[in-house]
Image (cartoon, rainbow, N blue to C red):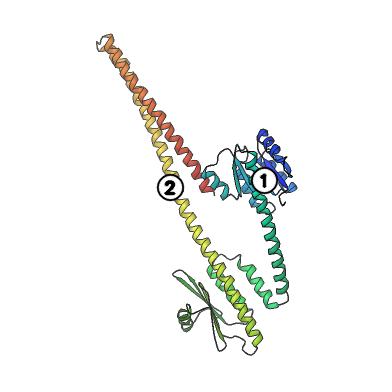
């Protein structure tokens, strides 16, 4: 079994006792914390594989604790399962957005928690197996590449482009990489309607641009004389001086450039996706801010209306108390007028309760918007 160590975090001792009772039937090592800060203080020393994390806690709520765990490279790999008295879609989405892997709603039964932990155990087993496979494959690949200066250049290039966030910078990095192989290169990037060209000389000639356009849909690889054109969906590469005098080197370089263009295309896709997500997030934040502002305006208007109503009713009462005794009305008439005024005030109070409910709903919406703007 991969899962052996669990940390339970809850500010209610009774909830921790329930978890301890359930887990004592299983072969797990369990430690507990009663607050978010205590969890963060002890987690690296204990290093659990799974944290059962209560959402509603003082000082730091579960979402804040989870964000801190995932932001720390030493604890980011730990699986977090939120434990909450509520399991709305919004709460589950919030849990997912801060990096949690699972969610369980209180009160839960023995079998439900056991089933959740069984599933997490399987996740851990598969994750460890995959990490071992990746580790073995990576080790083999890097050992092989270390024996070749050419592959060393490629490794450096692949490592470095992961930090690039602009297409123009990526294009220049690709040209520089190919320059290290003494290759005269021209590159075309296609990003929707935007097309960018890069060359060792700084500018692609018109004939090269036309060649890119003519051959971009004609297959992956074109070789003619000592030139080679490599086509991918978003990138085309033209090399003008392939080493024809050395057939072995020619074949090796051809394989290298195909791989280099492939990984460059993946990074270009990643850059485009990131920019699209940033644009969408900016639009979403703008909409959320607008709604946030409108809600505050409506609440202010409701408060102003309430204050105005109170002022009108107070003025009406004062005028009636002053005028009715001088109007020569009999007792029944006075009672009737006071009764009607009182009924009107009571109806207004009832409407005020409705207004309070509307304001409470606005406050809840505002809370969700605040969480959205922080994420």
Tell me which numbered mark, 1 or 2, is placed earlier along the sequence: 1
Q: Is residue 10 left or right of residue 198?
A: right
Residue at the extreme top:
331
Say which of 180 and 226 sits in front.
Answer: 226
Image quadrant in which you'd find residue 321: top left
Q: CA distance from mark 1 to mark 2?
A: 37 Å
Q: Is residue 359 left or right of residue 41?
A: left
Say which of 309 and 265 sits in front.
Answer: 265
Q: Are marks 1 and 2 in contact (CB under 8 Å)?
A: no
| Mark 2 Cα-neighbour bin, 10 Å: few <14, some 14–19, many ≥20 | few
Q: Is residue 112 left or right of residue 327?
A: right
Image vertical order of residue 75 relative to residue 348, above or below: below
Image point (31%, 19%), residue name: 340
Numbered-mark total: 2
Location of residue 11 in the rendering, given as x and y in whole percent from the top left corner: 65, 36
Q: Is residue 65 left or right of residue 338?
A: right
Location of residue 291 in the rendering, given as x and y in whole percent from the top left corner: 43, 45
Residue at the extreme front:
111
Image vertical order of residue 4 relative to residue 261, above or below: above
Image quadrant in which you'd find residue 115: top right
Q: Which mark's residue is nearer the viewer, 1 or 2? A: 1
Residue occupied by mark 2:
290
Residue 222 seen in render:
yes
Q: Which mark is residue 95?
A: none
Image point (46%, 52%), residue name: 284
Residue occupied by mark 1:
51
Say what secondary structure mark 2 lies in: helix
Location of residue 320 in the rendering, given as x and y in whole percent from the top left corner: 30, 17
Say which of 147 and 302 sits in front.
Answer: 147
Image point (57%, 47%), residue name: 95
Image vertical order of residue 315 relative to residue 155, above or below: above
Say what secondary structure mark 1 lies in: strand
């Amino acid at each position: 079994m991969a899962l052996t160590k669990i940390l339970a975090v809850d500010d209610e001792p009774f909830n921790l006792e329930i978890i301890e009772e359930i887990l004592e039937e299983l072969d797990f090592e369990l430690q507990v914390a009663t607050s978010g800060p205590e969890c963060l203080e002890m987690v690296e020393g204990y290093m659990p594989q799974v944290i059962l994390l209560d959402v509603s806690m003082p000082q730091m709520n579960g979402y804040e604790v989870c964000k801190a765990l995932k932001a720390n490279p030493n604890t980011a790999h730990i699986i977090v399962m939120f434990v909450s008295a509520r399991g709305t879609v919004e709460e589950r989405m919030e849990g997912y957005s801060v990096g949690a892997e699972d969610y369980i709603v209180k009160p839960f039964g023995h079998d439900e928690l056991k089933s959740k932990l069984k599933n997490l155990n399987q996740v851990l087993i598969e994750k460890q197996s995959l990490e071992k496979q990746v580790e073995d494959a990576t080790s083999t690949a890097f050992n092989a590449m270390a024996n070749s200066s050419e592959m060393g250049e490629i490794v450096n290039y692949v490592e470095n482009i992961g930090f690039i966030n602009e297409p123009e910078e990526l294009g220049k990095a690709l040209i520089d990489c190919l320059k290290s192989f003494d290759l005269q290169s021209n590159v075309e990037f296609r990003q929707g309607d935007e097309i960018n060209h890069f060359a060792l000389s700084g500018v692609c000639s018109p004939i090269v641009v036309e060649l890119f356009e003519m051959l971009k849909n004609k297959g992956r690889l074109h070789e003619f004389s000592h030139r080679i054109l490599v086509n991918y969906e978003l990138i085309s590469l033209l090399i003008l001086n392939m080493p024809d005098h050395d057939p072995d080197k020619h074949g090796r370089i051809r394989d290298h450039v195909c791989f280099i263009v492939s990984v460059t295309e993946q990074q270009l896709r990643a850059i485009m996706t990131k920019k699209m997500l940033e644009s969408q997030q900016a639009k979403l934040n703008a909409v959320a801010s607008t709604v946030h502002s409108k809600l505050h305006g409506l609440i202010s208007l409701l408060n102003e209306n309430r204050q105005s109503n109170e002022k009108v009713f107070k003025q009406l009462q004062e005028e009636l108390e002053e005028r009715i005794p001088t109007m020569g009305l009999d007792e029944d008439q006075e009672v009737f007028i006071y009764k009607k005024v009182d009924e009107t005030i009571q109806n207004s109070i009832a409407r005020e309760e409705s207004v309070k409910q509307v304001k409470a709903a606005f406050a809840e919406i505002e809370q969700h918007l605040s969480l959205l703007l922080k994420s």
